Amino acid sequence: MRREIFTEEHDQFRDTARSYYLRECAPYADQWERDGQVSRAAWTAAGKAGLIGWEFPEEYGGQGIRDFRYNAIMAEEMAATGSVGIGLGLQNDVIPPYLMRLTAPGQKARWLPGVTSGETICALALSEPAAGSDLKGIRTTARRDGDEWVIDGSKTFITNGILADLVVVACKTDPPAGHKGISLIVVERGAEGFERGRKLDKVGMKAQDTAELFFHEVRVPAGNLIGEEGRGFYHMMGNLPTERLAIAVSALASAERAFEVTLEYAKDRTAFGRPIGQFQANRFALADIRARLSAARVYVDGCTMALVQGELTADEAAAAKYWTTETCWEVVDRCMQLFGGYGYVNEYEIARIWRDSRVQRVFGGTSEIMQEIVGRSLGL
């Protein structure tokens, strides 16, 4: 199926992204999974290739390009090359709205060059042990003490938590005000009282470091507040449609990769004297997957262009995130079945895709939360 949403410039960017992933990431996938994190060298290589922070102005090392199609290309090529672990999606999809739109010129000059070069790895610390989808329920606090903020609390499920040099932390600066008292404060590596807990032993996405973070009387300059004090909840809500579409793009790319490796296997693997793909049950299964992926591609590309044009709504993004992640899981699970016993062996890529795909129905808001958002938009 020919895709109509990309220009020649996007195609050139895709070539750069694919070359980067094949050179700097795919060869190290197994090692990174064993280590539980990626090499920092892969981050700086991405920076040198211009694959981080293209949205930022040129004076900070970026290219001044705000176009989600580039984000989609990065996610698609990561899946297509069998690369794992590196949290460039968080760095490019999630972090820019916080560091670009909520920061003052001095803050930009201080932080953006390192982010764009890949030398400064970012994390977004929202989730807590008792507050995941319900961000209003966070308990981490920050109190003002002269020219400093003093932060106390803990976070969990934090992507890039171990490697992060700069963490955007959601804190309650006015606890009695509830969600109207949440603010966003940046904590930098080396701050006294800022500790990283255990690296979480996850079912999948093992190469992507996910950690607990602890804040014990952590003092940071008052100037590390980004956005408006007490408006943090609204800042976070404003960024969610983009984050959820990014998850939808990644989910579809994972399903397409699963189909690709499964189709190849079905042509090569023989049973009872012929390739297993020639058995009607398997051929029909692959045909069904092909049809689902084709429909999903049109759907996601349409959402992508709606975002580029500033027209994507929160409920549309939630619907895309819900449908693609659920579809991805169904597709990947069916593909794994076609591998038979080999699908359960870790040396086969389909096993890794299967492990990694399950959490997409959880992070960024569970499927049930997405259904609730869409349901409310229907006036129910």
Image: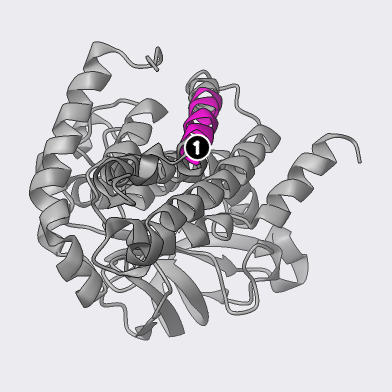
Q: Position of residue 105 (x, y in %)?
A: 33, 41
Q: Determine whether 160 is above or below 24 in the image.
A: below
> Dot 1: what SS?
helix
Q: Residues within 10 Å of mark 1 (few under 14, many from 20)?
A: many
Question: Which quadrant of the figure has residue 350?
Answer: bottom left
Q: Determine whether 237 is above or below 142 in the image.
A: above
Question: Which quadrant of the figure has residue 275?
Answer: top left
> Going 43% across and 44% down the picture, which residue do you hit?
255
Q: Which residues are magenta?
A: 285-299
| Drawn side of residue 138 relative to residue 89, left or right | right
Question: Which quadrant of the figure has residue 244?
Answer: top right
Q: Determine whether 332 is above or below 312 in the image.
A: below
Q: Position of residue 245 (x, y in %)?
A: 52, 38
Count of numbered circles in the view: 1
Direction right: furthest residue? 380
Q: Amino acid at mark 1?
A: Ile
What residue sits right under mark 1 in the picture?
289
| Drawn side of residue 332 relative to residue 347, left or right | right
Can residue 156 be seen by looking at this rendering? yes
